[in-house]
Image (spheres, rainbow, N blue to C red):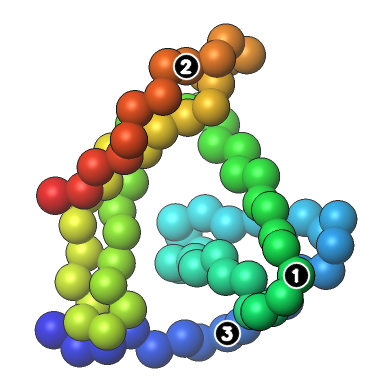
Amino acid sequence: EKPLEPVATRFQETNEVAYMNDSIGLHRVENVSHTNTAATLHVYVPAFDMCQSFDQRTGHKRKCQVTFWSKYGVRTPYKPSSCS
């Protein structure tokens, strides 16, 4: 195991849109401000139930069950996400 090293960094401004998929690489979302709040909207089409999470320090990956606010336009019941 070894730390993950960034190969690129991209900053998004207010109301900008970004695109990411597995063939491009991994991504991390972060609010670098200590005073301003931030919100992101992630749209996954089609919806999926599992993803992988990576520990940046070790490179170790784990499977995580994801939760969704809604699926196909219908609100889903809240269930905390879990990783193994």
Picture coordinates of residue 52, whole percent (x, y): 29, 53
Does residue 20 lie above or below 26 as drawn? above
In this rendering, does residue 3 appear at all? yes
Marking on residue 8: 3
Counting other residues with Cα less than 10 Å from the Cα at mark 3, is it few (<14), some (14-19), or many (20 or more)?
Answer: few
Q: Which residue is mark 1?
A: 36
Q: Earlier in the sequence, mark 3 or mark 1?
A: 3
Location of residue 12 in the rendering, given as x and y in whole percent from the top left corner: 76, 69
Going 31% across and 59% down the picture, which residue do you hit? 53
Q: Identify the element where label 3 is drawn.
A: loop
Q: Amino acid at mark 2?
A: Thr
Q: Which mark is residue 76?
A: 2
Q: Earlier in the sequence, mark 3 or mark 2?
A: 3
Front-most of 20 and 75? 75
Number of the label disc, if any, that sits on residue 77: none
User: Residue at point 57% right, 70% down?
Assistant: 30
| Residue type (three-letter) at the residue carrying disc 1 | Asn
